[in-house]
Amino acid sequence: MKRFKIIIVGLCLISVNLIPFVNVYGQGTSNLPQLGKSPIEEIIAAMTLEEKAALVVGTGLKMGEKESNMGFQIPNQPIPGSLADQTKVYVSGAVGRTLEIPRLGITTIEMVDGPAGPSFGSQTTAYPIATNLSSTWDVDLVYEIGRCMGNEVSEYGLDLLLAPGMNIHRNPLGGRNFEYYSEDPLLSGKIGAAMVNGIQSQGVGTSVKHFVANNQETNRIAVDAVISERALREIYLKGFEIAVKESDPWTLMASYNSVNGATATESFDLLTTIARNDWGYEGIIMSDWDTGKDPVEQLKAGLNLIMPGPYQDTVIIQAVKSGKLSEEVLDKNIAWILKNTMRSPKFKGYEYSGKPDLENNAEIARKAGAEGMVLLKNENKALPIKDKNQKIALFGNGSYVTNVGGSGSGFVMHAGPTINIIDGLINGGQSIEETSKQVYTDYIKENTPKQNMMRAIRGYIKRAVEMPVNEDLAKEISEKADIAVITIRRNSGETADRKIEDDINLTETERNNIENITNAFHALGKKVVVVLNIGGVIETASWKSIPDAILIAWQPGQEAGDAVADVITGNINPSGKLPMSFPVKYEDVSSAKNFPGTPAEKPEQVVYEEGIYVGYRYFNSFNVETSYPFGYGLSYTGFSYSNLKLSSKTFKNQIEASIQITNTGDVAGKEVVQLYITAPEKKLDKPSEELKGFAKTKLLQSGESQTISFKIDAEKLASFYSDKSSWIADEGEYTVKIGASCEDIKLSQKFNLKDDILIEKVSKALAPKVAIDEMTK
Ligand code: BGC
């Protein structure tokens, strides 16, 4: 699998091959039914068994002609002359495509990774990572980012972006958390839906992935996630459900792992019962790349498309001939593919320009990066650094070589030039202290290891280890500078989870550097700012008291440095808030003792004993202190919350809550307002707070107010009763809490629900086959 990725990457590096697409629609033999003109049943009836079997399987990893002659041995190659082989490569570097059957007017769907922007042979934009985007809590801005990504997909002649990733941040060690949005399903679902709507507004498709519970990379291909029905419905499926219902993604990508004993791609419960029947999903359900054991079982489960192919067709043909697979099941899967093929630009004959608006897209990427940065601490107004004459001493390798994203399929391989933090500050007219610049530049030059280009192109880049700054060097620089900025940098990526030591926790060098630099600067009355160039949680509790200010910059995409400079200098007032909790220490996380499962080296099973108590649902309900709570983030201004009003004290169909937010400081700013609900605990354990709404104010000028309204419908009050397979809102007293974070509740009001409401009865599905000793209060 690893080898397969590396080879693909290499090939994408080699060539860009955009073949103008000529629509084959209508060009088939005239007396044959044509997709779009004839009913789908007629098209299917006109297909041979060979065509049918080849259509439910991707056409493999066929590259452009140029690459095929490079002498590489490329896996997943179609057999020369086979149907899969006959499908043209329109855009070289696409990571998968469906079968083209010109005689029936069936066009191909060409797909490309991934969540931080399209990544293939042409120049695209590296957007901020998903976690950076969700930290904006701004669905309009995320829609806009989606629109930009969609513009690149469509204008390069592609059909579908393999994004967004919507798995829950179950545990900070999750290697792909950076590709995902949040520990909370509502935030994840709303941001994901906005992303899908934005991308699809450009006439191209998305793939909401990885469905479901792909919350770790360790043995992702074989681990069985054992999860209660309630935790599945309330936490792990919920975000996907919101995205399906609010954005109609063209495809859903079933994950590598198993859930409650069944491989996700072979789970009828997951794919058919839940996605199709309960949610009414109408797109294509496809597999993650090279996953699942049995193609026949996959098709029976309702997996429409096995990616990337192309080998499984012979097994499918055999199965139909032997009666193991009914042709009816095959036809059903085909119908979903055909229906959605008609949505694609290739089918519609879209004449792409080859020229997406990269300049505009970079601008939006910069804006979103900055809007999603989270100010954790700002004592004595250390930030912003407004005075351009102030000399900034820049420490930390990451100030000079900034990480723009994580690695793997979520890395954007041919992005525009990276703007490092130093470049951004210089672009913004700030003065950089020379000695710090010189020592770091020399050190990084001498200590950066030789790269393995095949790996580097997918973001597996070897970096120089952090340069130690001893007391003498810190002192020398502190005398020449006015303020210090220290960057702490992290990276993680697909195929590996993170580590506690030297990753979640700071390395010894990083810790010493923060101490030495702060001591030296503080001795002269000068301030120190730490910038966290990270993709996910790190430990902050043990050192956060040392510097004056801490800003999470995340991995903000190719415009990183300019976005950081925008916030550091106050061009943009930070308004991002944490989409996950920052624990005091890793061991405090509710899933810590059940991650990555057993046996630890190669887990076959991971039991989600924490149940619904993920992230803040756990910290709040069990009174476990965090270093920074979910929803937390500071601003250069302050906000007051007043006038919380509920439209009624008794719940009927809906209650409206409104609140007034006022900017009480002296600079303009935006505030993310969060609505939590505490539900009555009659028969079920309930988390003490659950996010049920959020909004971001407009840019409020000093003294300006805005009234924010939230609609609370019955569905928001419901919990999932596994014994009844039902969402039920329990009668009793509910508390609406409006907060600046899940721990900083500003105002609250109560209302009553007189009788239980059965919101929805769903199918009995995905019940665990082993007992779970699930956490309760
Ligand atoms: C990843 C997917 C990705 C696919 C195609 C898989 O390994 O899990 O997220 O879209 O490869 O590159």
Image: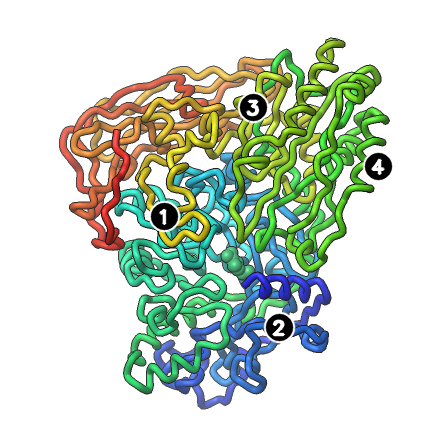
**What's the residue at 14%, 32% (across, down)?**
755
**Type of amino acid at the residue the image marks with label 4:** Asp
* Residue 515 placement: quadrant: top right
- Secondary structure category for the residue under label 1: strand
Q: Which residue is mark 2?
A: 74
Earlier along the polypeptide chain: callout 4 or callout 1? 4
Which residue does the numbered mark 3 point to in the structure image?
376
Q: Of 350 and 366, which appears nearest the observer? A: 366
In percent of width and height, residue 732 lies at: 18, 27
Type of amino acid under label 3: Leu
**Mark 1 or mark 2, which is nearer to you?**
1
Q: Earlier in the sequence, mark 3 or mark 1?
A: 3
In the image shown, does 554 or 190 lie closer to the viewer? 554
Decide which of 72, 245 is in the foreground and name it: 72
Residue 439 visible in image = yes
Q: Position of residue 24 (x, y in %)?
A: 56, 79
